[in-house]
Image (cartoon, rainbow, N blue to C red):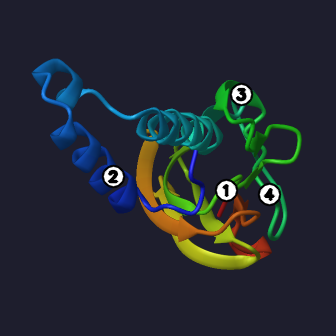
Amino acid sequence: MYRNETTKELTERSNKSSQQVPNEKESRSDTPQLLDLKRETKTKIKKESEVSRVAFYATVAVSDLFNLGEHHIIVFDHVVTNVGRAYHGNTGIFIAPVNGVYFFSVTAMSSPQHYQFLELVKDGVPVNDILADANNANFYVSVTRAFILEIGQGSEIWVRTVSAENMITKR
């Protein structure tokens, strides 16, 4: 195979050799070099897609979280799905295995007369907050927030309480 040739050059060379061959069936076939290039490209695409497959779904195993303290990381310890093993159920931290655009969805639920004030954090910097406020209610309140973030390989994402005065507790 001619390693220094571009795809365009290989295609041109293939077209020239097929034009020289009068047999219609042969003129449509790829040259050995072009076949090798196609195989290499397919292998590379397959490897890249295997590395970039990332998805996880995790929940909190306990029914109530109270008095967690300031900036306490919420550990979603019941891991249902973890394709790519990027979510760490023992720490509550997601570590991006590849650069990309990621979708995160966080649902928080508060029991009557309580509220949850949480935030999604990227590399130590808050991205946005999640507030499920049932403080003045006699029913449960559930809130779901979605986040689409462009993050680099190695970036860390987690959910934590906002502050001690706003922790998951009764006011």
Q: Is residue 58 left or right of residue 40?
A: right
Residue 42: percent from left, percent from top:
49, 35
Q: Which residue is mark 4?
A: 73
Mark 4: which secondary structure?
loop
The disc at residue 170 is 1
Badge 3 amino acid: Val
Q: Which of the marked residues, 4 or 2, is nearer the chain's N terminus?
A: 2
Q: Nearer the viewer, mark 2 or mark 1?
A: 2
The disc at residue 79 is 3
Residue at 46%, 32% in the rendered image: 32
Q: Nearer the viewer, residue 122 or 65?
A: 122
Q: Which of the marked residues, 3 or 2, is nearer the chain's N terminus?
A: 2
The disc at residue 13 is 2
Q: Nearer the viewer, mark 1 or mark 4?
A: 4
- Cβ atoms under marks 3 and 1 closer than 8 Å: no
Residue 59: percent from left, percent from top:
65, 33
Q: Which of the marked residues, 4 or 3, is nearer the chain's N terminus?
A: 4
Placement of the C terminus among the 4 image quadrants: bottom right
Residue 167: percent from left, percent from top:
72, 64
Badge 4 amino acid: Ile
Q: Is residue 85 left or right of residue 145?
A: right
Residue 99: percent from left, percent from top:
61, 63
